[in-house]
Amino acid sequence: MPEPTLGHYLVLSAVLFSIGTAGVFLRRNLITILLSVEVMLNAVNLTFVAVGRYLGSADGQIIVFFVITVAAAEAAVGLAIVIALFRHKETLNPDAFTTLKW
Amino acid sequence: LLFWVFGVVVVAASLLVVGQRNPLYSALYLILSFGALAGLYVLLDAAFVAVIQIIIYAGAIVVLFLFVVMLLNVSKEDAPAGNRSLLMGAGPRRFGVVLSLVLVVELAWALSNLSGTPLQPGMQEITVRDIGVRLFTDYAFAFEATSVLILVAMVGAIVLARKETP
């Protein structure tokens, strides 16, 4: 097997991002959708670290630090919204929340 | 060689995250995925990122998810309404399938153009000290903004999830 290059890391990141995107669109469970968003965020983090390593710069890792912080905030607020929605409808199916649909 | 081991584990675990019907198992597979990803970060000489990946993601975020899954106690995804065919499904589903296929095609194109840009071994080591210095000089404003963001997220989560009591 060849030594991993920058391209290998970028392709792995793209695979992860595709998996996450597919999960967001295909799952019908709000919690699984949020977990898929976490997978997508991780794919982006991998890109940042790989390119930062390639350029020999610390910026990539600093951006990843911020991404992880924002992901934590997103998870907290998102799960709070999921709990509030579940109190209303007793379901986690996103198709059930159509009150704003015209 | 370790790259391939970790890479296969990450992809397999992420597929299982997306493929599970029970969000409990999804969250547990996500921990496996994060662990392998931390291994990849170590291979990229990014020990700091690997450590915060384990501590914050696997330690805090996934535990938060598991907490909510067990709080809501919904182990089964609702049965699909109407026909199950992927391409003939409802609008968002069909859109999702098309978008995923487009991403796979782009991926194949990227793979065919894969040039061997080697990662130079250790141009200069990026230590935690470097990251800390940059964080508190060049990125000081972003750092402070992050603290406000976390405060807002905390207040928002409490307000949203609290019981409606006058």
Image (spheres, coloured by chain):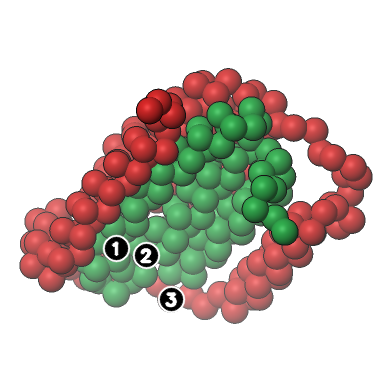
Chain colours: A green, B red
Quarter of the image with the C terminus of chain B is: top left
Give the percent coordinates (x, y) of residue A48: 37, 65
Q: Amino acid at mark 2?
A: Phe
- From this view, report whether residue B79 is shown above or below residue B140: above
Pinpoint the chain carrying mark 3.
Answer: B
The x, y position of residue A10, in whole percent, is 49, 66
Disc on the earlier residue, 1 or 2:
2
Disc 3 marks a residue whose amino acid type is Thr
Q: What is the chain identity of the residue bearing mark 2?
A: A
Which tag is nearer the camera, tag 3 or tag 2? 2
Name the residue tied to disc 1. A63
Q: Sort mark 3 into few (<14), some (14-19) or many (20+) by Cα contacts within 10 Å.
A: few
Mark 1–mark 2 CB contact (< 8 Å): yes
Question: What is the chain identity of the residue bearing mark 1?
Answer: A
* Circle 1 SS class: helix
Would you name the residue on which mark 3 appears?
B117
How would you rate the neighbour count of disc 1 (Cα within 10 Å): few for under 14, some for 14-19, many for 20 or more?
some
At x 59%, y 45%, the residue is: A33
State the CA–CA distance, disc 1 to disc 2: 7 Å
| Depicted B39 relative to depicted A25: above or below | above
Amino acid under disc 1: Ile
Mark 1 or 2: the one toward you: 1
Residue drawn 42% across and 38% down? B160
Q: Secondary structure at mark 2?
A: helix
Q: Residue at x 24, y 68 (%)?
A: A59
Q: What residue does disc 2 label?
A: A48
